Image (cartoon, rainbow, N blue to C red):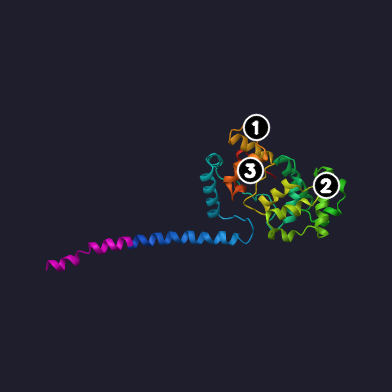
Amino acid sequence: MPPKRKPAARKPASRKGTPAANKGKPAASKGRPAASKGRPAASRGKPGAHKGKPGARKAVAHLSAQDPVLAGVIAAVGRLPDARDGRPAREDHYGALVRTIVGQQLSVYAARAIYGRLTERFSGRPPTPAEILAEKPEELRAAVGLSRAKVSFLRSLAEHVIHGDLELERLDELDDEQVTAELVAVKGLGTWSAQMFLMFHLERPDVLPVGDLGIRRAIERAYELDALPEAAEIERIAARWRPYRTLACRYLWQSLRNRPM
């Protein structure tokens, strides 16, 4: 009889059953990373795209682990605003470049106001190249509040697009350096403008605008430097941020409660 009672106790069976039940939980949790893997895979088709919460968490974790000073900035800033808020649709490369030109060398608020007047003139949307060229330059300047130089830049952009010198539909296929080379060929689009386009419109993840005054000032404050850093020093500091320098810059801009147009 005693030998029969031992199997009937079922304690060993219950112990085996508990790990078996626990195994089910990790299996369920494994499903979540598997689902998140689909997002980065989808974003790989577009160079530099880094949408999706899993990818953002990974980038923030990398930046925080690599740079304690930047980790403090990230913690102080908290949640970043939507980078696409108020910007043209992802496929509207021309509208994004128009917005970039309008925002050059202006405060965020002034740039938004002028861009708002421009889109109001064209039924709430960015003007097409043909519409820009159809406008009388002085009338457009006076109505919107643009400088004469920026009106000429907008006309140069429109001409490049209409004549086929700037093939906007190809930009997604090019790497960062190639995109920059294409854009700086247009009057009024310099390196900084190309970098803003890469960062905020094409959403390339590893862009570092070393000449941007906001980035220089934010680094000076965060790293307690004696003066605004030059390009070489910014490159040295930012080497640890690769391949997420765009995101690092967004946190630095936000630490000043400012961001480019």
Give the residue displayed 59% in from the left and 49% down from the top. 244
Determine whether the residue tagged by mark 1 lies in a helix, strand or loop: loop
- Crowding at dot 2, Cα within 10 Å, few <14 / some 14-19 / many 20+, comes out as many
Query: What number is the disc on residue 227?
Result: 1
Q: Is residue 42 left or right of residue 12?
A: right
Percent of width and height locating residue 251: 59, 43
Please identify the residue farthest to the left as the structure is shown: 1
Q: Which region is colored magenta?
A: 1-19
In the image, residue 94 lies in the stretch drawn in magenta: no
Q: Nearer the viewer, residue 95 or 3?
A: 3
**Marks 2 and 1 in Cβ contact (< 8 Å):** no
Percent of width and height locating residue 249: 62, 44
- Where, quadrant-wise, is the C terminus in this rendering? top right
- Residue carrying label 3: 235
Q: Visible in this render: residue 36?
A: yes
- Examine the residues drawn in magenta and state their main secondary structure: helix
Q: Nearer the viewer, mark 3 or mark 1?
A: 3
Determine whether the residue tagged by mark 3 lies in a helix, strand or loop: helix
* Res 110 → quadrant: top right
Type of amino acid under label 1: Ala
Which comes sooner in the sequence, label 3 or label 2? Answer: 2
- Residue carrying label 2: 151
Type of amino acid under label 3: Glu
Q: Nearer the viewer, residue 240 or 95?
A: 240
C-alpha separation, residue under disc 3 versus residue under disc 1: 16 Å
Against 132, is 70 above or below?
above
Type of amino acid under label 2: Val
**Marks 3 and 1 in Cβ contact (< 8 Å):** no
Give the residue displayed 67% in from the left and 43% down from the top. 210
Percent of width and height locating residue 188: 79, 47
Q: Nearer the viewer, mark 2 or mark 1?
A: 1
